[in-house]
Structures are given as structure tokens and as C-alpha cells.
Image (tube, coloured by chain):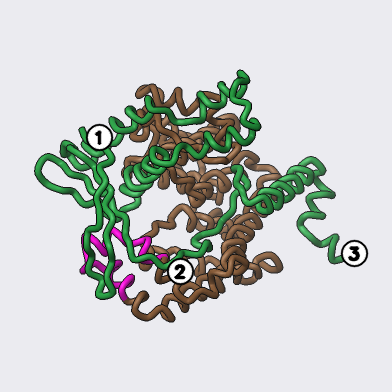
Amino acid sequence: MNIKLTKNHIVLIFCFVIILIKAFQQTTFYFLQGSSFFFPSIDNTYWLFFLSGIPQFISKSVYISIILDICLLVLPIVMFINENRILRYIYLILLIIFYLYFGSVTFLHKHFLTSIIFLFIPLLFNKSKLNLIFWELIRYYFLFVFISTGLWKLFRGSIFKIDQFANILKNQHCYNLVHSPDSWFAFVTRFVNNYPISGEFFYLSATILELTFLIGFFTKKYDKTLVVLLVLFGLVNYVFMGINSIEFIGYVIVFIPFDFFENKFRFDLNLQKEQN
Amino acid sequence: MNKLKNTFLYQIYINHKILFCVVVTFIVGQIFFTYKGVETFPFLNYGMYSEYFPKSDTLQVLKFHRDISINNLGIDESDFCLFEKPIQSYQEVITTGDPVAKVLKKRFNSDTTSLIYKYFHQHLVNTKGSSKFFQTFIYKTYQRKYKGNLVYVTLNNYLLSSDYTVELINSDTIFRY
């Protein structure tokens, strides 16, 4: 059986890796089971989710949560070989349930995590023209997401507050300031608070970087540059804020040409058979 | 007009009318929820630290007291998701009430006698019963992650001085096992 590595396969690998990280962080269904204290916020989708009784059902059953975790991890591997469309629909529903359940129990409606859902949508239309169209749509959606983060900073006026980044860091690294004053994050917080202009420089640079993605709406000529900028954003986010942006960096997939992997990697799962 | 015809949206309109309607609905939905300032998945607002953070010299930190030692939480994402954010939100709900209950009351115009309201309340609002489960959940999660028996959890407030030394102002016990 020949498997040409495509963009769709990369998404499956990406989903598998993210779920694996979540499992190591002990934040998958099994680990979050039993809380019974939920936070649906005022998000209507979360409300519908809770009115359906699904999270309450998962929370009460250890076995169901284990089964769901196994499905989250195993299905991407199965779909790597088997292109069954129904499996893909099931997996997308599972990802949405995971996203909503994770947000409800951790009280953290983590927007970064939506990447596994949005990036998975084109896979529902494998081998059809719609697959290509959806890849384009997700590319535009990501551009909108990134540009909107810059616009929010601009319109809320936070980029004009010189102490904004200094205050963010103080809030973000309060544990380090109290417990590990010699750590890197405590040092960065002290430095930026002593020299707020340096923080303003970083905050302004991040906003400009986010707004740079506007160019992606008009041309694909700079997609490689946008990939570099996105990875750079993730790295700087980690170094200064301690935020793991791996889910968000996954969006680099949308900038990769459709046949990029196909021409470079090919798997042959049944080499012996072919040789015979 | 020619430029418009070259757009991706126009191409979708020509080739897939249904998909075009879906895309336009999504765009309208996104604009609507952004304007309203609320989120309804998948219409999310990606603010990313855009709200103004006012200057504050107090730091709020959780402390986990186990057996005889004190465990200071790490800085990893896992601790943030499993302990910090849930416990701080729990504390908020306990002291000021569940914000969902307030929104629910407002949406039902304070008519709390209807059956639909009761159904919504039962499924959406945290009760004292769920609070007990939450304490057990934190205990078990902590035991699994840090292999220690929790005795109590406190939320400490510190004053950060100009030379970045910290001084404990007060300490509230959230759970005692």
C-alpha cells in the first residue's frame, strides 16, 4: 500500500501530537473526569453542550472517559491508513467535545486549541475539490485570527499604554516572583518593569507582527515569511511569557503548498509485497 | 467588477452556492458576536492580552500544603489548567456566586418558576453538591500528579515592593481535607 504524505496526513500527525501532549499534561478526558464543577461561561455553544448532558455523563463515568481518550489517540493513526469519511466526521465531533469539555473543567476556554478543530475540517472532504477550497478557507480564517489579535490591541488602546507589557508580565509570572525570584521569568519581569520602554517595544513589535499577516489576504508570495514570523511569535511567546503556543503554531500547515509533502515523502507500507 | 470576480469568495459563489452561503453566514456570525462582545464557539474573539492590565502591587498565589511540607506550584501549563485557573475560578464562584446563574436570571427576565428555567439551572449552574466533588477532584488530581496527600490549599496575597521582595498580606484557606 502506497501512502503519499499529504497536508491532510500532517494534520492527523498534528492532532495526534497535541492529544499526546495533553495526555502527558494530564488534561485529557480521563484526567479531567470527576470534577462536576463546570464553567460554561456565557458561551451559547457551551450552554447547549451542558443542556445535552454530555459533559455530566462523561464526568460520571471513568470507563467512558478512558474510551474517549483511546479514540482521541488511536483514530488519527487509523485514519492515516484508512480514508473512511465517517471516521473523520466522528473524530471531528470528538475533537469538538474534547475542546468544550477541556474548557469547562479547566475553566480555560483556550482559543489556541481550536486549531485542531479548524485544521481538521478540510479532511472531511478528502480527495475532492472541496478539500482544496476548505484549505484556502482555513488559511483565510487563520489570517483573520492573527490580524484580529493585532486589531484588538490597537482598538482597545493597549499598545499606547507604556506599562501594559510590564503589568502583563507581573500578572503572568507572579508565581516566579514569589517562589523563584532567581528564575528567568522573574528576571524578565523585573527588567521590563524597571525599563517599561523595553516592554512597550516588545508589545508593539508583536502587534506589528500580527498586523503583517494582512498581506496574506492579497498574495501568497510571502507565505514562507509568514511561516517564519508565526514560529518566531511562538518562540518569543514562550521565552517571555512562558506560554506554549504549539497548538497555534500548527496553523503553519495552512501556508504549506498542497503538494509540498507529496513530492518529498512517500511511504510504502508493504515493501515486501511490492518486491515480490 | 473584474477585480471582484477574481476574489476567492466570488469563485466559491460560482462553484458552490451552498458553501458560499455557509461562508457568508460564518462571516456575518463572526461580525455579530464581535460586535456584541461575547463569544459563541466557533465565533471567537482573539484578544490575546489586548485588555488593559492595570498596575498592581499585589500578587495572588495558590499554595498547596501537604503533610508537613508546602508545595509551590510550578509554572507549567498543566498546573495552570489543573489547579490555578479552576481553583481561582471556583473561589470566585463561591464568594460572588456563579456568574452563569446571574446571566440565566437576566435571560429569563427573573422568571425563576418556569420549568425551562429550572432545567437550564440544573444543567448549567454549579451547586454546593458540585463544590464537594470539586474538592475531591483537586485532591485526587494533586495526589496523582505530585504523589502527596493534600492537607489544605490556601490563596495567598503578597505585596510586591519596589525592590521586588514580597511580603505576605493575607492567606485564605480554600480547602481543608
Question: What SS does tag 3 mark?
Answer: loop
Please give the range of residues in magenta: A168-190
Taking the view exactly as shown, the residue that stands out farthest to the left is B68
Q: Which residue is mark 2?
A: A232
Subunit bearing disc 3: B
* Letter of the chain in green: B
Taking the view exactly as shown, the residue that stands out farthest to the right is B1
Question: What SS does tag 1 mark?
Answer: helix
Q: Which residue is mark 3?
A: B1
Question: What SS does tag 2 mark?
Answer: helix
Q: Tell me if mark 3 has few (under 14), some (14-19) or many (20+) residues whose alpha carbon lies within 10 angstroms of its own.
A: few
Residue B117 within the magenta-colored segment of the rendering? no
Circles 2 and 3 in contact, beta carbons < 8 Å? no
Measure the C-alpha gap from mark 2 to mark 3.
39 Å
Q: Position of residue B75 (x, y in %)?
A: 29, 55
Q: Which residue is mark 1?
A: B139
Q: Residue at x 61, y 67 (%)?
A: A213
Q: Residue at x 54, y 70 (%)?
A: A207
Relative to A262, is A56 on the left or the right? left
Q: Earlier in the sequence, mark 1 or mark 3?
A: 3
Of circles 2 and 1, the one toward us is 1
Q: Amino acid at mark 1?
A: Tyr
* Letter of the chain in brown: A
Relative to A108, is A25 on the left or the right? left
Subunit bearing disc 1: B
Q: Amino acid at mark 3?
A: Met
